[in-house]
Image (cartoon, rainbow, N blue to C red):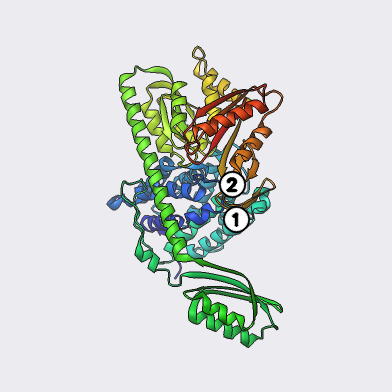
Amino acid sequence: MAITTIDASMLAKMFLAGAKNLEAKKEWINELNVFPVPDGDTGTNMTMTIMAAAAEVQNLGDNLNMTSLAKAISSGSLRGARGNSGVILSQLFRGFTKGISKHEELDIVILSDAFQKAVETAYKAVMKPKEGTILTVAKGGADKALELIGETDDLTVFLDKVIKHADYVLSQTPEMLPVLKQAGVVDSGGQGLVTVLKGAYDALMGKEIDYSIESTETGSGVVKISKQAEQDIKFGYCTEFIIVLNQSLEEKDELNFKSFLESIGDSIVVVADDEITKVHVHTNDPGLAIQQALTYGSLSKIKIDNMREEHQEKLIKDAEKAAAEQKAADEKRRSQQEALEDKNQAPKKDMGFISVSIGEGINEIFKGLGVDYIIAGGQTMNPSTEDMLNAIDEVNADHIFILPNNKNIILAANQAASLIEEKDIFVIPTKTVPQGVTALINFMPDSTAEENAQHMTEELSNVKSGQVTYAVRDTLIDDKSIKQGDYMGIGDSSILSVGKDMESVTKEMVAQMVDEDSAIISIYYGEEIEDEAAEQLGKELGEQYPDCEIEVHYGGQPIYYYVVSVE
């Protein structure tokens, strides 16, 4: 039976289903990120963004109509937006809801117009739109929707074709961005958008879905490893090997072997040619699979992984991550309380500062440079637009400068600034902590806010930044082969060094940052680095670059062992 219209109730179900589908696949989407850094990844940022809106939708209750639904989706996603991908997703929702809010029911023409408004709004929000991203995927879907007007009035047919075309455009993103092609992945933001659309379509088609949305806020409970989850793994060993055949397998032999594997396991893949056969099976007894395989030839490249153990390790890592997030949330609350107390005591000032920071030592450095409010976040927990709005509310000043100190936070800061009318907000596009420090050092109290914003922004080009961390996955980027666990020295626009030794990687990174005009090298060492090791590094760099002044500061940041600036 054809579906020609969608009412508010059905659209709410579709939106919640899209959110749940994205949440379920966020780690897979995270794996598509080109840079293999332990960062606030695309899947996580998009999920936290849409879940903020989903919570608003679920709270509508009896007040559900198209107008209230549109407001909940738009407001919830705008305030909850995290990271560049989350902000762009929120802008897509913002434009889409503009196109639907005044209609009681949606048909193909209205939806197509809403898709167009979504794309227009999102493109306007990005200063320099780049093709091969979520924007391109969204535009491909919207263009297909326009093309289909008049061909059918059945929304199931219409949306199926729109989503399939968006999926096709997604598959072409590696051809548009060389960095994607080199890494062998599609755009992660575009994949996130398609995932949302597919989840929404499942709801329209009547698929049974749990629409309940859990709170996205970090709780104070203890994360426990579930024995039931471990028991749900029916076959515990992922077993892979290659059979070097004594003679070519006949079709009946291949079928018999597959049948045997099916009797002892699942997830079976058997790929055979004249000389070798590649085998993959999940089983509780790898020995049986190996014994049977030996009847056909000799074995090589045997690999057996305990999936229950891997699952348990993942749960432990998830628990550690949750604990780290809880610690960051506690620090954030303390910072907010301290800022509130300072606000209540401090008189109103002309100009104030908000800075995103990533460690205790760096917090103190920023406070010493005059920052009024510190937002805990940075690399591991991208703050949301609402975090920015709360910070703006707490700073008692007419003109406020925001220092994002991370390229993935600038859009969220700009979005917050666009929502404020009673104060003048200036977002200084600092992409790293050293750039934030440079901006503050170049603040001139006697100049106007506008003059300061221009001057601080211009000075950012005079500092080079480098950060040393580790790779969380194998990849190929900037013509460098990177293995999981490698140390990486990441510059302002590329990976500068890769290796197994942290100190060597750090020195090589600095070597590529220093030139004949360099005068100061500043080192901010992380929470895992001993004071003596950092001082020794500073001493060795001082000997290597005698014309440069070396400064060593405790940063206390997680994840990034060293943050280095060269000026």
Q: Position of residue 332 (x, y in %)?
A: 37, 35
> Closest to the observer: 18 or 561?
561
* 141 is higher (above) or lower (below) than 549: below
Q: Answer few, some or many: residues within 10 Å of disc 2's Cα (few below 14, many 20 plus, some between 14 and 19).
A: many
Sequence order check: which comes first, mark 2 or mark 1?
2
Q: CA distance from mark 2 to mark 1?
A: 19 Å
Indicate the quadrant containing the N terminus: top left, top right, bottom left or bottom right. bottom left
Q: Position of residue 5 (x, y in %)?
A: 43, 60
Q: Is residue 43 visible?
A: yes
Q: Position of residue 245 (x, y in %)?
A: 68, 80
| Amino acid type, residue under disc 2 in the picture | Phe
| Amino acid type, residue under disc 1 in the picture | Leu
Front tag of 2 and 1: 2
Q: Is residue 415 left or right of residue 329?
A: right
* 165 is higher (above) or lower (below) than 39: below
Residue most extreme to the bottom: 252
CB within 8 Å, label 2 to label 1: no
Q: Is residue 138 left or right of residue 213?
A: right
Q: Answer few, some or many: residues within 10 Å of disc 1's Cα (few below 14, many 20 plus, some between 14 and 19).
A: many
Residue most extreme to the top: 446
Label tally: 2
Indicate the quadrant containing the C terminus: top left, top right, bottom left or bottom right. top right
User: Residue at coordinates 32% horizontally, 51% vertically from top-left?
Assistant: 222
Q: Position of residue 128 (x, y in %)?
A: 61, 38
The residue carrying mark 1 is 170
The residue carrying mark 2 is 35
Kindly identify which numbered label has been placed on residue 553: none
User: Residue at coordinates 57% horizontally, 50% vertically from top-left?
Assistant: 485
Q: Secondary structure at mark 2?
A: loop
Q: Tell me the quarter of the picture where residue 420 sits.
A: top left
> Closest to the observer: 554 or 126?
554
